[in-house]
Amino acid sequence: MFEIPTVKKGEEGNHVLLVQEILLAREFKGKDGKPLKLDKHCDVNTVFAIKQYQKAREKVEPGICGGVDGVAGPKTLRDMIAL
């Protein structure tokens, strides 16, 4: 098993890119309504897409992401990778 660091606003790196790729593949868009840029930077658009993902998943299974906060922490990451 591998561990992915938490992704939150201001984070940069390959772990952010992984989350962006998952969100893009599942057609979650940024705050600007456009597909996410795969730039390894967790900006306003990435945070917005994370929140949209969390909202969608929490409706299906409350608690699966640990809430809607725009942070891809352990629960959200586990859910993203398990789907």
Image (cartoon, helix red, strand yellow):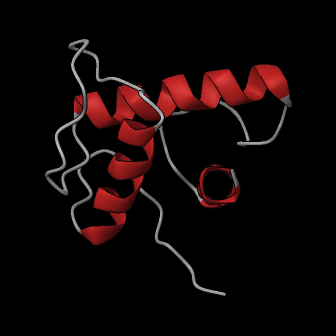
Q: Is residue 8 visible?
A: no
Residue 2's place in the image compared with 17, above or below, is: below
Q: Position of residue 30 (x, y in %)?
A: 29, 23
Q: Left or right of 64: which side holds 13?
A: left
Residue drawn at 65 percent across, 22 percent down: 56
Residue drawn at 85 percent across, 29 percent down: 62
Residue drawn at 33 percent across, 47 percent down: 20
Q: Left or right of 12: which side holds 49?
A: right
Q: Is residue 10 visible?
A: yes
Residue 66's place in the image compared with 12, above or below, is: above
Label tally: 0
Q: Position of residue 80 (x, y in %)?
A: 60, 51
**Residue found at the far bottom of this picture:** 1
Residue 45 or residue 8, whichever sits in front: 45
Residue drawn at 23 percent across, 68 percent down: 13
Q: Left or right of 20: which side holds 77?
A: right
Q: Left or right of 17: which side holds 22?
A: right
Quarter in which the N terminus is drawn = bottom right
Q: Position of residue 10 (x, y in %)?
A: 23, 50
Residue 8 or residue 55, whichever sits in front: 55
Residue 79's place in the image compared with 25, above or below, is: below
**Residue found at the far front of this picture:** 25
Q: Specify the quadrant of the image occupied by residue 81.
A: bottom right
Q: Position of residue 48 (x, y in %)?
A: 38, 25
